[in-house]
Amino acid sequence: MRLFDKLDRFDPNRFVRFRSSLHDERVATYLGIGLGVSFFVCFGTGLISHVIQYPPSWYAWPSRPAGFYRISQGLHVASGLFALPLLFAKLWTVFPKLFEWPPVRNVAHMLERASLPPLIGGAFFMLLTGLANIFQWYPFRFFFPSAHYAMAWVTIGALIVHIGAKWSIASRSLRAPLDGSGDDVQGSVFTRRAFLGSMLGIGGIVTAFTIGQSFSPLGRLALLAPRRPGVGPQGLPVNATAVGAGVVDAATSSDYRLVVQAGTAVPLSFTLDELRALPQRSAELPIACVEGWSASAMWTGVPVRDLLRMAGAADGAVAQVESLEENGLYGKSQLNRHHAADPDTLLALQLNGEPLHLDHGYPCRLIGPNRPGVLQTKWVQRLVVL
Amino acid sequence: MMRPVEKSETPEYRWYSYVLFATGAAVGIFGVWTLVRDPAGNNPDYSAITAFGFNIGHDVIVAPLISLVGLAVARVIPLRARGPVTFGLLASAMTLFVAIIPLRRYGANADNPSVHPINYATSVPTVLAVVWVISAVWLLFSYRRQAPTL
């Protein structure tokens, strides 16, 4: 652009010098590939969770494989944590580009640069609000799931634009022969290879010390994680407590009844002892949270499909489970035809052979395969066929 | 071949670049629409300012700070030790960055001991110790590889 040629005396590169060999196209390309893969994994796994919680009318999320949701959300958080050091490294590597002169060279270049604030701001927004969320810290003035979801689309859109803009440069830099420049042959300075290895190593360290929250065999290594699989009432973490949900009195009352209603038929009503007297089934199922933590346990209770049949519901019925927690965001959840018919979808009364702890949903809670923790409704009082 | 990022030529845009521009723009516009259609939940102005603030915060504070630390390392640390020391500093900074929330007990809930279940005041130094052990091993190898031979 001619205007900028005339303004050469304002070129910031006259005053700023970046000498490090790490501000290099090939380094930026490798970091960009790592970040791109992490962000697309994060986006895809986040989208899975969103679709399960807000399903379109034409789609019913399957109940099998039982542990798929657990793996997907463990991956969601792990890829986000892994991306954090890569993001800082990538931005530092391309920091000299901030002072690029002229700042725009043509219309397409201008559009490419315009996509950077949403990309960088969105990337930080996603990773930092996600980090706060896994520790259950909400200092921001928006509803986290909703804003995180919207900003994910903004960020991934900007990332797609960025890939379009950088594809040819990235391909060229990967094809260019290595001549060893920037790599100290004596192996003693912070070479490009050592820098990239270090960034992968740092991402690996952060991941290794947190992944135990979703991968139980590494639970003891979870030194930076917000959760540990074995810590919580009855050895299992919880998100909402009975005190926090305000259900202690109702859940422990001798007046407790589970009501099962199908259409206009007379509703069935069960005391806790009557529920215990029904045929029971046990299943080992994970509680898996969108925050990445998960843990398996042995649950025992009454299969939901048995209760629906007793109430006269037709095969393939869709049902709603309602909690004693009336004001919570997750006081109700729906069971689509797959989940309602799955023999392992239980209204559980026991956890690992003991009556449920109050914080795990005593007297009775929903537990089903391949479902987010927020949809495993606790303190259930009604099961309604829709 | 080394090619400093600031010396990059004007990018060559091919046909697929324009396809990706259009796709990305459509996806991004959907995101903006999703953001603004729920003003009560998303607080769009605040969300946008927060995201833009992260941009500015990085460019004005974080990146210059990292560059200054890099300069200091280059001046103070002997050549052979720069790699391991830089790794140790960056890994420590990232560990503390991730751990600052539980260390400050943000989000902790006295009602629910399964959130923040670890004593982070001891677990975080343990992770830092692992980081510096890795740095020390790297340093050792770096010096051994450079040892003069007879």
Image: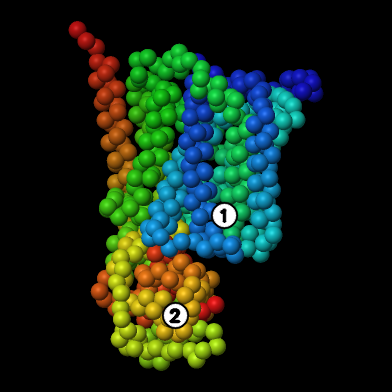
Q: Position of residue A30 (x, y in %)?
A: 48, 29
Q: Position of residue A59 (x, y in %)?
A: 55, 61
Point out the image quarter for the C terminus of chain A.
Answer: bottom right
State the residue in front, B62 or A206: A206
**What secondary structure is found at the residue carrying circle 2?**
helix
The residue at the far left in this view is B150
C-alpha distance separating marks 1 and 2: 36 Å
Q: Chain of mark 2?
A: A
Q: Chain of mark 1?
A: A
| Residue under the image location 64 percent in, 31 percent down | B16
**What secondary structure is found at the residue carrying circle 1?**
helix
Is the residue under label 2 in contact with that under label 1 (CB below 8 Å)? no
**Count of numbered circles on the image:** 2
State the residue in front, A139 or B9: B9
Q: Is residue B109 shown above or below A216? A: below
| Residue under the image location 34 percent in, 45 percent down | A208
Q: Are marks 1 and 2 on the same chain?
A: yes
Q: Is residue B117 visible?
A: no
As drawn, is A311 to the left or to the right of A355? right
Q: How is the image coloured?
A: rainbow
- Residue A133, numbered label: none
Pointer 2: what residue?
A: A308
Tell me the amino acid under the disc marked 2: Leu
Q: Is residue B74 shown above or below A162? A: above
Q: Is residue A268 shown above or below B35? A: below
Pointer 1: what residue?
A: A148
Tell me the amino acid under the disc marked 1: His
Find residue A227 and report its image quarter.
bottom left
| Residue under the image location 59 percent in, 37 percent down | B59
As drawn, is A4 to the left or to the right of B132? right
The residue at the far top in this view is B150
Q: Position of residue A135 (x, y in %)?
A: 44, 57
